[in-house]
Amino acid sequence: MAKTHKEYAYAKINPYLAVTGRRSDGYHTILSHMQAVTLCDVLIFHWDPNTEKNLVFRLHCSDNTLALDESNLICRAARAMAERLAADGRSIAGHLTVQLEKNIPLAAGLAGGSADAAATLRALNVLWDCRYAVDTLCEIGAALGADIPFCIKSTTAPAMTARGIGEQLSNAKSLSRSCYLVIACHGEGVSTPWAYRQLDEQRIALTPEEAEQQYAALEAALAKENLGTLAACCYNCFEQVVLHERPAAAALIDAMKKGGAVFARMSGSGPSVVGYFENEAKAKDCADTLRLQGIAAQVCQPLF
């Protein structure tokens, strides 16, 4: 019997992000506060198990610039889930169609691809009656991308602390419910591998001890639920290498501050910028002003 399932793939921002080293296998260690937000992609999955002898996959997207081949993380997540089932003695055959409404900007440091992959794993766990625990889904997802385990858990734990290469997750304090966010992206995207190479070449990293000390101050600020206090504790190491190369991102930070943001920071490896507002009306006015300038901007809130 054919089945349909809807999933929401929530974007991720990083009020705090520090690189603390590089392992011998090339992966970087981090300390980060990850926060899911209400900006999201919407995925509709249609599964018909009676039409094929093998797994046949079709992906459609509202954004015609997105690659829809096997390089797409949605496709890779579906294949990884099928392979895990095969390893557990179950074969999957049928026609899987995914319709993706893309709202999270591409290559913007918002974990849009990872969120889509996480939504795929959650959906197929239902449609294929896998009955895998969340930790198993995270194990499958981690092989595809370091942000995917957080994105899998974000629907029930929207704020987490990430250590290691991002796989060591623990629950964290969310941003305040009274916080309004403007997320904007303009200009050329940023390749995450390129951004990490720049950090390496310029030797930009905190020691684990320095990062933990800063992060403790961030946690204390989050507990006070005051954006003015939080502003001094937020940090993104990638700003030191990206803002010089992507002046549009630096201009967005200035524009959001002028538009009433308590502060503004780049998210992830950029070039998206997040403005933190105490007032919804100011956030909407700022986003409207940016859109009149041809800049993609959306108002959202922390996910709870």
Image (cartoon, rainbow, N blue to C red):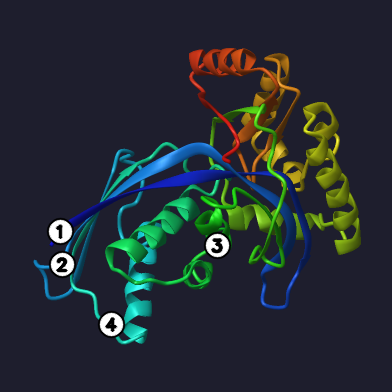
Residue that numbered label 4 is attached to: 90
**Who comes first in sequence, dot 2 or dot 4?**
2
SS for callout 4: loop
Label 4 packing within 10 angstroms: few (<14), some (14-19), many (20+): few
* Tag 1 near tag 4, CB within 8 Å: no
Q: Amino acid at mark 2?
A: Pro
Q: Identify which residue is drawn at 67% across, 77% down.
A: 25
Q: Amino acid at mark 3?
A: Pro
Residue that numbered label 3 is attached to: 149
Mark 1 or 3: the one toward you: 1
**The C terminus lies in which quarter of the figure?**
top right
- 56 versus 14 height, above or below: below
* Tag 1 near tag 2, CB within 8 Å: yes
**Who comes first in sequence, dot 1 or dot 2?**
1
* Residue 87, horizontal then vertical, whole percent: 36, 85
| Cα distance between the residues tagged 1 and 2 | 7 Å
Residue that numbered label 2 is attached to: 49
